[in-house]
Amino acid sequence: MAEWFERFSRPRRRTVDKALLPSMNFLLVCLLFAGTGALLWHGVIHGPGAVIVFVVSGSIVALCLHEFGHAIVAYKGGDWTVAQTGYLDLDPLKYTDPLLSIVLPLVYILIGGFALPGGAVWINHSLLRSAVWDSAVSVAGPAADLGFFLLLAVIYHLLPDEAGDIAPAVGVLAYFEATAIVLNLLPLPGLDGFGIIRPWLPPHVAEAGNVIAAGFGFVLVLLVLSSAQVGEVVFGVGSWLCHLVGVYDVGAGWNMLNFWRTGG
């Protein structure tokens, strides 16, 4: 009976195909990101305001790709319900609460922090085919961050020597992506690092982690990040990743985001 119900409850192929179409909200953010980048590249616009628009819109694009990574792997792994929730259309407004998912992380960036984890898609883990798929769902988010980070590195190396403000804009956005990769891989409840190992933990440990993540996971992350040692690791590894791929100008971009404090 359960197999019959699941088979006839699954969305039809046409519904799934429609769910995979990018939302208008996502396309508009992409247009803003690409358009601002092009104008910065050609020197039509410049200054902290333009850099902030570029970094904020790029961060939203990155968040959507991160959450889409989780959702598409979950769908491939057996959780067909994500096709009905809108998680596959890359709409930033559908990735949990807009305040916690988008506004708060972006404000944290603009006041001089690094990229906090943003949204989260709700996955029906009981529908996933195996523990391997369960771990893969969590891996997919940081993997999407890595892909976007490498894309930014390629764009950075395509810039001319006298690139103007686009170089620091791309540099600092790449840095935020690098720190997001490191941060999300920390094995803390509520982060992808814990999600990767959760299927392999004793059931009572995994359940305790789920309770912590649901109750005050975001607060726990903030408390851990307030530690100088953890911050040093996240900042340090993020900087190392940028240097590894030859992305610089991070400091200049950082100062432009914080012009109201640096006087730039």
Image (cartoon, rainbow, N blue to C red):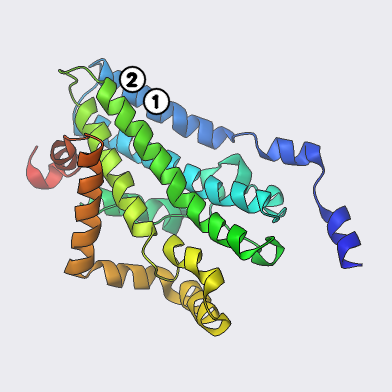
The residue lying at 69 percent from left, 56 percent from top is 79
Q: Are marks 2 and 1 in contact (CB under 8 Å)?
A: yes
Instruction: Answer with left or right where residue 98 lies relative to residue 179.
Output: right
Q: Amino acid at mark 1?
A: Ala
Q: Disc 2 marks which residue?
A: 38
Q: Which residue is mark 1?
A: 34
Pick the quarter of the image with the C terminus.
top left
| Nearer to me, 27 or 3 | 3
- In what quadrant of the picture does the N terminus appear? bottom right
Identify the residue at horizontal 35%, vertical 39% (top origin): 149
Amino acid type at mark 2: Ala
Q: Residue at x 33, y 32 (%)?
A: 152
Which type of secondary structure does the marked residue at label 1 adopt?
helix
- Measured from the top left, where is residue 220 in percent x and y? 36, 73
Residue 83, visible in the rendered structure: yes
Q: Nearer the viewer, residue 9 or 229?
A: 229
Cα separation, mark 2 vs mark 1, equals 6 Å
Q: Residue furthest left?
A: 263
Where, by quadrant of the figure, is residue 184 drawn? bottom left
Q: Residues within 10 Å of mark 1 (few under 14, many from 20)?
A: some
